Image (tube, rainbow, N blue to C red):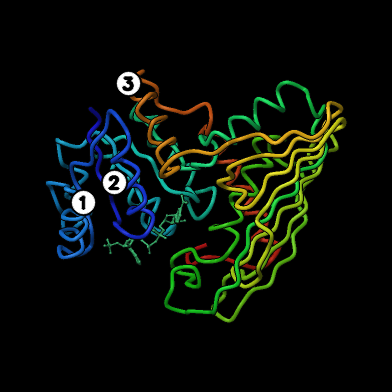
Amino acid sequence: MMRWGVVGPGAIATGFADAMQHVEGGVITAVASRSGERANAFGDRFGIPTRYADYAALAEDPEVDVVYVSTPHSRHEVDTLRLLEGGKHVLCEKPFALNARQARRMVAAARSRGLFLMEAIWSRFLPAYRSLVDIIGSGKIGEVLLVEADFGFQRPVDPEHRLFRLDLGGGGLLDLGIYPLQLSSLLLGTAEHVAAEGVVGETGVDEAVAAVLRFSGGQLGVIKAALRMKMACTARITGTDGVIEVPAFMHCPNSLTLQSAAGVEEIDGSYEGNGLRFEIEEVHRLLAAGSTESRVMPLDETIALASTLDAIRAQIGVAYPDE
Ligand SMILES: NC(=O)c1ccc[n+]([C@@H]2O[C@H](COP(=O)([O-])OP(=O)(O)OC[C@H]3O[C@@H](n4cnc5c(N)ncnc54)[C@H](OP(=O)(O)O)[C@@H]3O)[C@@H](O)[C@H]2O)c1
């Protein structure tokens, strides 16, 4: 039984704890909040016995094997490094870090200690994404030439919300754009050239961004993300011999549409319950096998994703404090 800790009991941690109730082989034994009251409320809600009113204490808890870091992006590095120093394996929410420099330090710390670390790109473990990878591998759409994907909402500006706060790593690119980007990376690898345009709002974060990626084999990626522009939230993968459409929401689809020489086929990718459970099951499998990295979401790819996000931000003029 893997004993989990949770650091930062906010919105997605609630989803994580809900998913954990439907996963075999793991249990949340401790939660850490900046406030004792919030730690207790989360602990009561999910039956978690140990509650901490500071994050450092959880890193020292000998009853915890692996920790889910679900704080705002600006804290991912500091929280992950402290947990690794305490000997914990870590599943860190996306985006893994504010920039590639932080990502490299986190990865180096895990590797030097022989501890497990993974960016929580839950999409990749969902049935539809597994099918997507299988279809591409089968050659049914030939060679992938183009990946188009977007993820954007229209939200009112709220300078207090983490998404609009530069100091918390706000902006649509890091929060939502990581999903279209990781899809292009999954299918085409790391772009050799990036051209981006963006709209930076009054709080200094990117409110809308569009980027064209060019890959070494001449393939293209077109990705968009926004906090203040409603987008289709879909993806389309064009190959030499066919097309795959990923419906909304492209980061957690229930199905795929495959158009190929054989005709049009709907591929079922539906699942019961909370989709976060698939990545948790992957962590359990890997820890049980003594693996420290996932082949589905490798750490070198996580660093490459962070580098591409850096390149896009440099072009649209978004820099976080201390950068
Ligand atoms: N996988 C997904 O589908 C998904 C979905 C949403 C978000 N995420 C990622 O998960 C992370 C958290 O997102 P969220 O939506 O859960 O955020 P959230 O609701 O604001 O929760 C973040 C938690 O972090 C803690 N925290 C520590 N320092 C903080 C600070 N300075 N300001 C605000 N909160 C702080 C807070 O808990 P305490 O104060 O109680 O410690 C807070 O509840 C982000 O990196 C985001 O990109 C992933």
Q: Is residue 153 above or below residue 158?
A: above
Amino acid found under the numbered disc labelled 1: Ala
Kindly check if marks 2 and 3 are in contact, taking CB atoms under 8 A apart as contact: no
Q: Is residue 43 left or right of residue 230?
A: left
Amino acid found under the numbered disc labelled 3: Ala
Q: Which mark is residue 56?
A: 1
Q: Residue at x 39, y 54 (%)?
A: 12
Q: Which mark is residue 288?
A: 3
Instruction: Confirm if mark 3 falls within 8 A of ligand 1.
Output: no
Q: Is residue 24 left or right of residue 123?
A: left
Residue 105 visible somewhere in the drawing: no
In this figure, which residue is indicated by the disc labeled 2?
Answer: 82
Q: Residue at x 34, y 25 (%)?
A: 287
Q: Residue at x 73, y 42 (%)?
A: 191
Residue 68 visible somewhere in the drawing: yes
Give the tally of numbered discs: 3
Q: Earlier in the sequence, mark 2 or mark 1?
A: 1
Q: Which quarter of the figure is the N terminus placed in? A: top left
Residue 112 locus on image (x, y percent): 37, 30
Secondary structure category for the residue under label 2: helix
Q: Residues within 10 Å of mark 2 (few under 14, many from 20)?
A: some
Residue 47 locus on image (x, y percent): 16, 48
Instruction: Confirm if mark 1 falls within 8 A of ligand 1.
Output: no
- Label 2 vs label 3: CA separation? 23 Å
